Image (cartoon, rainbow, N blue to C red):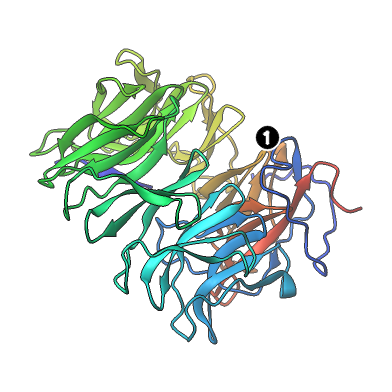
Amino acid sequence: MRFWSCGLVVMGCLLASCSSSTSTPEPVEEVGVMASGLWDYCSRTAVSLGVTPVEDQPFSPVMAVSGGGMVFGVVDPASGHEPWVSSGSPGAGTRLLKDLFPGPQGSNPRGFTRVGSRVFFAADDPAAGRELFVTDGTAAGTQRVKDIWPGPTGSFPDSLYAYGGLLYFTAGDADHGRELWRSDGTSAGTSLVVDLVQGMEDSSPDLLTRGGDGALYFKAIDSSGLFSRLMRMGSSLTVTEVFRITSDPGIQAPLVPVGRKLFFATGGTHGVVGALRVTDSGGPAVVLGQFSMLGDMAGVDGLLLFSATQGEGSEDMELWRSDGTAPGTVLVEDAQAGPVGSTPDQFTVLSDQLFFSADDGIHGAEPWVSDGTAAGTHLFGDLELGPGGSSPQGLTTVEDHFFFSADVYGRGEEPWVSNGLRVGTVALTELAPGPASSSPRGFLRSGWSVFFSAADGSGVRWMYALPFRPDGQCPP
């Protein structure tokens, strides 16, 4: 759970038993096709793809979907750390995409970000240093986009974000420092957007987020480095400052759009508590409430739901909501009465409902659900019966299901899936049999598979794929 600080097992589950074939690669759809409607998993058993993904940077996307399949990084003894691609099948269906930096050291690809049917990422180039690359999922369609900082220095692209059909990102060159750039995947179509801090000094744009008003918002620092600024870029590429605050601790992640409003948190300085703030279409940032800690946030049916603690030194973290006004920023439910709090986290949204982990002091940490009202906020399932709790982690919505891990006595922390109903919440086949844990994470769909990483019984992490198809498309 991300904080900033100032000063059951479902025994009656209904499941259609479907078989899946691993001998032939699953089709990979064109991006945007089959992206809506009802879906179902064809098996409760995920298939190991036989490779170990690189996941050592938690804030860098581990994988992304291209027109040619799922793209991710793998360390191979022969080629080192390079990009791989998979259709969801082992063997020929999962292969080295391209050896960008020949030799055992590899190109160290990271920041995989989907834009349309292509995936952008940063990687090391033998001649150009660390620069921007793009792939369509084929070897021929994988290449360096541009040598932004000419020569071997490298521009070190970061904060990659898809917006308006282009990639926006932070990069540095000799004339402008680290500023906001954009790219259409070609050298000619890759250019500086704005030099917010003139000359070699950096504005270091970060937290790029599309607002509900259609504008691009991001955080940047001023020329002195003493202030953190919330910036807004409209359709004309004009960048304006919405809000500024001292950089320590400044504007916190994430920026959360809800309707035409953008919510964000700021920390205090010198013992002053922080605040939840909102801007409506780039207007003045209004304080909605003061909090000593803020946790996860999500937009649900026109409201912001968030976990928060009021009072310096308090541990009473509970679920709150805001309609974008100070009077409308209120506690939803005191799930664990007293000074400790239920600590809601691991937020995911499915069908205008928030699913999350919370501890009411009776059942331990278990999955909960909320529609933003007290009456609609309750325990979703007691997966580990009694006060122990299953400690749900990594709740992630994929189409009309959400995937997560849960730790149940005798079978450890293993993958689960839910369609948003108690009877449709089931444990998948153990990947680390017995009390050992596979600790699955990073669920993401490509084609007819949900990809994720998990550990086997020896503790080695592998990439897995679970057959997942539009309703009625599972093989008999």
Query: Residue, x 65% and y 35% (percent of image)?
Result: 420
Q: Nearer the viewer, residue 285 or 389?
A: 285
Q: Amino acid at mark 1?
A: Leu
**Number of callouts:** 1
Against 305, residue 20 (above or below) is below
Against 258, residue 23 (above or below) is below
Furthest-top residue in view? 327
x then y, percent, for residue 225: 13, 47
x then y, percent, for residue 23: 82, 70
Q: Nearer the viewer, residue 216 or 207?
A: 216
SS class of the residue under badge 1?
loop
Query: Residue, x 53% and y 83% (percent of image)?
Result: 79
Q: Is residue 266 left or right of residue 132?
A: left
User: For mark 1, what is the residue?
Assistant: 421
Q: Is residue 392 left or right of residue 193?
A: right
x then y, percent, for residue 6: 18, 40
Furthest-right residue in view? 476
Q: Nearer the viewer, residue 397 or 416?
A: 397
Res. 258 image quadrant: top left
Label 1: few (<14), some (14–19) or many (≥20) C-alpha neighbours in 10 Å = few
Q: Nearer the viewer, residue 238 or 33?
A: 238
